[in-house]
Structure formats: structure tokens, C-alpha cells
């Protein structure tokens, strides 16, 4: 399973999303879009705006800390 979290330092929902993944024992990579131009561009290309958090779960993009969507994406291993 491949999970990536695109976040920003002052984003409370980013911290919540990462803690949620940790509580489910899901390993993930994290990229800070505020200091990583490639990560910023990925978010712009896939979401259309610079917002966080954005999760990429095996190619399924989840915008925001949306537990049902995160769970659904994780279930489609």
C-alpha cells in the first residue's frame, strides 16, 4: 500500500490526518507543500488549488481530513 500525505506546518487537519493514519498503523510518506515545489505542483495538478491535507492512497486522492473517504481508500488495497 502506498500512502502519501501532502501537508503544511500550520494545518491542524494535516496533523489530525497523520495521527489518524498512525492510529490505524498505516505507514505513509509526508511532503510539506510550503517548502517542496514538486509536492506543491503535485497538489496543484491533482486538486487544482493549494490546499492541505491531500492524501494519495494507492492513486485515490482524498482532499481534507475526511475519515469515511480515507477509510474507503484504505479498504481498496
Image: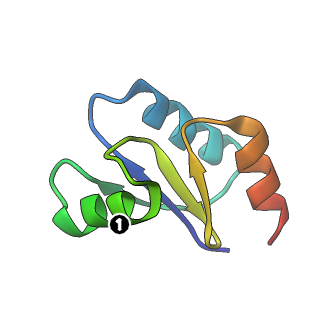
The picture places residue 13, in percent across and down from the top left corner, at 48, 29
| In the image: residue 56, left or right of residue 76 | left
- Picture quadrant of residue 38: bottom left
Coloring scheme used: rainbow
Q: Nearer the viewer, residue 44 or 30?
A: 44
| In this view, 25 is above or below 3 | above
The picture places residue 44, in percent across and down from the top left corner, at 33, 58
What is the secondary structure assignment of the residue under circle 1?
Answer: helix
Q: Looking at the rendering, in which quadrant would you find the C terminus?
A: bottom right
Residue under the point 65% across and 72% down: 58
Residue at the disc numbered 1: 42
| In the image: residue 37, left or right of residue 23 | left
The picture places residue 64, in percent across and down from the top left corner, at 54, 38
Q: Nearer the viewer, residue 5 or 25?
A: 5
Instruction: For label 1, count other residues whose C-alpha is less than 10 Å away and answer few (under 14), some (14-19) or many (20+).
Output: some
The tally of labels here is 1
| In this view, 54 is above or below 37 | above
Residue under the point 15% across and 53% down: 35
Q: Nearer the viewer, residue 28 or 38?
A: 38
Q: Nearer the viewer, residue 1 or 48?
A: 48
| In the image: residue 68, left or right of residue 2 | right
Residue under the point 68% across and 74% down: 1
The picture places residue 69, in percent across and down from the top left corner, at 74, 46
- Picture quadrant of residue 76: bottom right
| In this view, 2 is above or below 72 | below
Amino acid at each position: 500500500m502506498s500512502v502519501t500525505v501532502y501537508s503544511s506546518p500550520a494545518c491542524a487537519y494535516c496533523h489530525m490526518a497523520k495521527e489518524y493514519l498512525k492510529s490505524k498503523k498505516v505507514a505513509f510518506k509526508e511532503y510539506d507543500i510550503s517548502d517542496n515545489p514538486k509536492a506543491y505542483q503535485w497538489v496543484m495538478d491533482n486538486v487544482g488549488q493549494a490546499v492541505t491535507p491531500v492524501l494519495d492512497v494507492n492513486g485515490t486522492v482524498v482532499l481534507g481530513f475526511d475519515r469515511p473517504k480515507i477509510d474507503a481508500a484504505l479498504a481498496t488495497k
